[in-house]
Amino acid sequence: MSDLAVELTAPNGRKYIQPTGLFINNQWVKSSNGQKLTSINPTDESEITSVYAATPEDVDTAVAAARMALKDPSWRDISPTDRGNMMITLSDLIAKHAETLATIETWDNGKPYNDSLGGDVEEVKGCLKYYGGYADKIHGQTIDVGPSKFAYTIREPVGVCGQIIPWNYPLAMAAWKLGPALACGNAVVIKAAEQTPLSILYFANLIKEAGFPPGVVNILNGYGREAGAAIATHLGIDKVAFTGSTATGKEIMKMAAVNMKNITLETGGKSPLIVFADAELDQAVKWAHVGIMSNQGQICTATSRILVQDSIYDSFVSAFKKQVQEVSVVGDPFAETTFQGPQITKSQHERVLGYVKTGIEEGATLVAGGEAFVKEGSASEKGFFITPTVFTGVKPSMKIYREEVFGPFVVIASFSTEEEAVNMANDTMYGLGSAVFTRDLTRAHRVARNIEAGMVWINSSNDSDWRIPFGGVKQSGIGRELGEAGLAGYTQVKAVHVNMGTRL
Ligand code: NAD
């Protein structure tokens, strides 16, 4: 075994070879100064392994490789159909390695294994196949300007795309960004989050196996302020796509201005879920639970503000509390029965518990959870667990009502009229997801139009599908990922004017 890979045995007994290097030009290399970062298992706080962490010099090397790839005939001149087939091959390889990828994701991130396998890995597979299918369907237009002139457009790749991804869906976020970028013929330098460096390195080997030429996809681990900032400021990068916090998104915008990079940002949220009195209560409760408590509440679109019409407020709160206590089984993410694993890191764990303290100080009522959860029978009392937390009696002025907590933490408030519900829903700097529960069809669509959000779920919550555009308004982001709309950020339109004989 080289010193750029290590054989590991995961907590579920699965043995596999974990790459630990930087993936540049289809090769594994060390970081320029040998620096590494260590991945921590959030379930028991043990060290999993260390991997190389990119320096700005390593980013330079990766960008140079990507620039070469853009000129390489084996990528630049390949037929779009062949490019798409490569992506479909990659998708098939994901299917072949699904269990190992899901194991790594759960070990490194703490999300329940069934979610990693049935959710995240499926998402990667489906998204890459979907965009693979698009590769030979990305057309320009011919534009009629009369008989003496003729015009057409070509949709060209943007160039070298820097992609900075978060820790809550490490593989899936990579696929959301790689899918459209590769379908459109770009070359990529992608940086994983320092909290979850492992699964993407395993994925890197599959990229090579699928036949992508060297330099088309370069995968780095590294710290945000070092490798991430080097990507955002790099003069050799034409576009930066980012998912993460709104604060970091703003910093990236400023850095990207250095060479006016094309940007796509998917940032934070405080998504409302409105329940009208005529809604099917049982369904509203179940979807509201899934909408906030899935993935340990670490979802940018989590419906973290539940707004309930006053006449059913008390019955909703008691049914919701019951649902949380019965369904949100907290524990070992590899256990079949677990609904909720640990938070990603000690600092996120402390952050969520800090909001519990804030909520109590602000005068809200804690009706469930709010405690650091020590796994039953655990001798070590380790792991970043939190009991699913529900606050009622919240006011729009409270921090817990306004700020993104990013954990299994929800606030429930009441409203009396539709107008008030919409005003409350829109009273936020964010505009990512939103949900409305009602049996009144007309009202459902009226509210959908009036809500300031990139996505609305009617009688549902947190649906995401690679065929459907995903993204936010206001301070939740710029641009769209997924669906046909996701291609727009990865091509630029060149207009060609043809003189058909007009002479001066
Ligand atoms: P973050 O936004 O700081 O990190 C996300 C990615 O950006 C990581 O890859 C990180 O290395 C990189 N990054 C960080 N600083 C950077 C910089 N200055 N320049 C370039 N890249 C940089 O998120 P975080 O600190 O891990 O989490 C903090 C909060 O962010 C969470 O509590 C949550 O509210 C939010 N968050 C949102 C999402 C989402 O999907 N929208 C995902 C993760 C975190």
Image (spheres, rainbow, N blue to C red):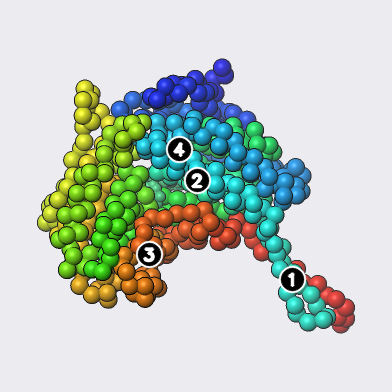
* Beta carbon of the mark 1 residue lies under 8 A of ligand 1: no
* Beta carbon of the mark 4 residue lies under 8 A of ligand 1: no
Q: Residue furthest top?
A: 1
The residue identified by callout 1 is 142
The secondary structure type at the circle numbered 1 is strand
Amino acid under label 2? Glu
- Say which label, 1 or 2, has the lower sequence index: 2
* C-beta proximity under 8 Å, tags 3 and 2: no
The image quarter in which residue 155 lies: bottom right
Locate the N terminus and report the quarter of the image it occupies.
top right
Residue 251 as seen in the image, left or right of residue 174? left
The image quarter in which residue 249 lies: bottom left
Residue 299 as seen in the image, left or right of residue 239? left
Residue 498 as seen in the image, left or right of residue 158? right
Label 3 – label 2 distance at C-alpha: 22 Å
Q: Can you say whether 39 is above or below 442 in the image?
A: above
The residue identified by callout 2 is 123
| Residue at horizontal 45 percent and vertical 41 percent from the top | 118
